[in-house]
Amino acid sequence: MVFENLQVKHNKFGLGTVVSTEGRYITVSFESGNKNFVYPDAFERFLTLADGTVSEEILADLSVSKSEKQAIINKKNAENAHSMTHGIVIPGKEIVNDSDDEESHYKSDSDEA
């Protein structure tokens, strides 16, 4: 999609014109000055086209962005679950034997002295 000269509306800054795009960033010129936004995220919460709509192409880009973010979240959650199922070692509290006595399960700092 060509963004330059696209008329947009911001819920705080009012009407503006896209003056440039660079990577995932768009710069919009408002009466109060230029503002930079992350594309397409800005169209989810802050920007609409001047007529109050969001184009199908922008909606598609938002959907892809959400999917990518969800994939990252799912990967992190899986990594965290994997780590937790394999135990978390607290320094100074390493397991030293398999006894049923809870007190003897952990090495304390005084055991090393």
Image (tube, grey):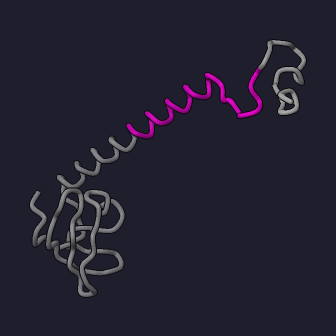
Given residues 27 and 88, the one toward you in this image is: 88
Question: Residue 41's image quarter?
Answer: bottom left
> Which quarter of the rendered picture does the C terminus lie within?
top right
Q: Quadrant of residue 11?
A: bottom left
Q: What is the quadrant of the N terminus in the image?
A: bottom left
**In the rendered image of this protein, does residue 109 appear above or below residue 3?**
above
Q: Is residue 34 left or right of residue 19?
A: right
- Residue 27 sits above or below residue 22 on the image: below
* The magenta stretch spans residue 90: yes
Residue 70 in percent (x, y) is at 40, 41
Q: Residue at coordinates 10% horizontally, 68% vertically from top-left?
A: 4
Residue 50 in percent (x, y) is at: 20, 73
Residue at 81 percent across and 26 percent down: it is 107
Q: Is residue 77 left or right of residue 44?
A: right
Identify the residue shown where x is 26% and y is 57%.
40
Extreme residue in the bottom direction: 31
Please give the name of the residue rendered at 28% of the width and 87% of the height, measured from the top-left corner: 32
Magenta span of residues:
71-95
Figure check: 93 above or below 11: above
Direction front: furthest residue:
113
Frontmost residue, 91 versus 19: 91
Predominant secondary structure, magenta span: helix
* Residue 98 horizontal/vertical position (percent): 80, 12
